[in-house]
Image (cartoon, grey):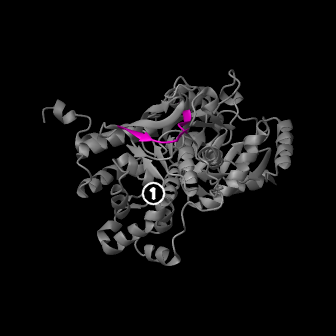
Amino acid sequence: MTKTQAVIIGGGATGAGILRDLAMRGVKAVLVERRDLAYGTSSRFHGLLHSGGRYVVKDPESASECIAENRILRKIAHQCVEDTEGFFVRLPEDDPAFEQQWLAACRALGLPAAPLAPAEAVRLEPNLTPRIAAAYRVPDAAVDGFRLCWHNAAAAARHGGEVLTYTEAVGIVTDAGKVTGVAVRDLLSGETRTIACDLVINAAGSWVDKVAALAGAEVRVKPDRGTLIAFNHRFASRVINRLRPPADGDIFVPHGSVTILGTTSAAADRPDDTAPRSDEVLKLLRIGEALFENLADYRILRAFAGTRPLYSAAPGAEGRAASRAFAVIDHRAEGVDGLITVVGGKLTTYRLMAEKAADLACERLGVSVPCRTADEPLVADPAPGLLAAAKKHFPAGGAELAAARLGDAFGAVVRRLEDNPADRALICECELVTLGEIKEIAALPTTHGLGDLRRRTRLGMGTCQGAFCGLRGIGALCAAGFADQSADKLLRDFIEERWAGIRPVLWGKQLREQELLRGIYGASLNIDGAMHDEGI
């Protein structure tokens, strides 16, 4: 039986942040996640690193946490953050009284909100509507949820933290009301075992109530579904917020080579209710056209949805009425000694949530080492000599992108490209991913398929959505002798996962693009079975 001090359940940003925090304080800890890191809420959002402006009127405590953590993440995780800045834009039909209320709240919290002449706003963002009544600059940014989770995991590993992906917690073992271990099942091998521990930290996002129930405890959480749209064009260089009380479809976020519009807010029946509705997509488009009047001219890549774990002590609060604050719950009062749950919050405040949960865990374990996660960077920048050498082998701009997403593995990839010129081949043109990077990530023990590789490298996440690089990636995996999986199984798994929780938006250009994608997959490896049907 494996023995550790703490088991963390849930591999989103908060769980990975807790693992890093505990490991840095010298606590032996293991994180278990039933899928890959960032598979759930930490990747199904608009990619916004909040300045706090969104919540400053209604929820000043959350706004204060956001601006503080925004500044910290720019310092410790700049590889995951694109400093786009943001605009808050009021249109003539929006209440001018709210603008004054918003400005007063920003001043009270010390949140920078610099006025900007409407003409200057349009000059900087030419696709914005010229109907702007007022505009302000705020320190919003874009953040990569996948990268943030994996960089936290890598930082934790340097201090002894361990990650077990595709490992599901199926039971919490107690003895006389005290937690003694977690029963887990390896979802790839089917094997079950127990990890003995002194503490369990439940960071399972929208699933926290189900994890708590494994120990007979209760958490009042309401999954809230948010639908978003990804466009194939970066038509805004900055985050664009509508300056009015928070509502659906008020935020555009430039993310890599695409722009994301979101989000809606609706009570979900279950935590994996991630199917976007057609009426939600149409509503987002209708609202979004107020800020970008030519929105219909852009091709939609996909609509997708995620659920947020809204926690409230008030049983009736849900949707936008529920606070975006977080809570750390010690279940000892319920008679489950050694179980801690962290719930609520948002990705921007994940580090603070992790710190508070780790503080309680250390108190219970008798560890007095203070938290250092706000001071030490997740990943060290590459040495100037290494980056200069890399630029000789990567395409223009590719070395910096690879260094940011690879972190500790960057040096090994550079050496691959130096030693093997064939590994400099581009597999994904949208995200500038080389064959050497594919080989390096494929060799990691946490990589079990093309989906895992996608989340680490962004292969298949650009404008082609994997239509071309997906097949190349599979070819590279097979050529490298990856596992014992056949090409068609790798492709089927990739497609099923890539399309999970999304609905194609099929009209006009979208319909033509989707038919091209379907034809490529079907004709290349007979995924649709047409050759069998025709007796070929």
Residue at (65% x, 57% y) in the render:
374
Highlighted magenta segment, given as a residue range? 193-207
Residue 110, position as x, y percentages in the image: 82, 52
The amino acid at mark 1 is Glu
**Taking the image as drawn, is residue 6 in sight?**
yes
Helix, strand or loop at mark 1: loop
Residue toward you, 148 or 94: 148
Residue furthest to the left in view is 535
Q: Which residue is mark 1?
A: 431
Give the image location of residue 375, x and y in percent.
65, 61
Res 331 quadrant in image = top right
Density class for disc 1 (Cα within 10 Å; few <14, some 14-19, many ≥20) is: many
Q: Whole-percent x and y of residue 376?
A: 61, 62
| Quarter that holds the N terminus | top left
Q: In the displayed image of the protein, which residue is found farthest to the top?
A: 316
Residue 430, placed above or below residue 63: below
Q: Is residue 468 visible?
A: no
Question: Left of 71 or right of it: where is 281?
Answer: left
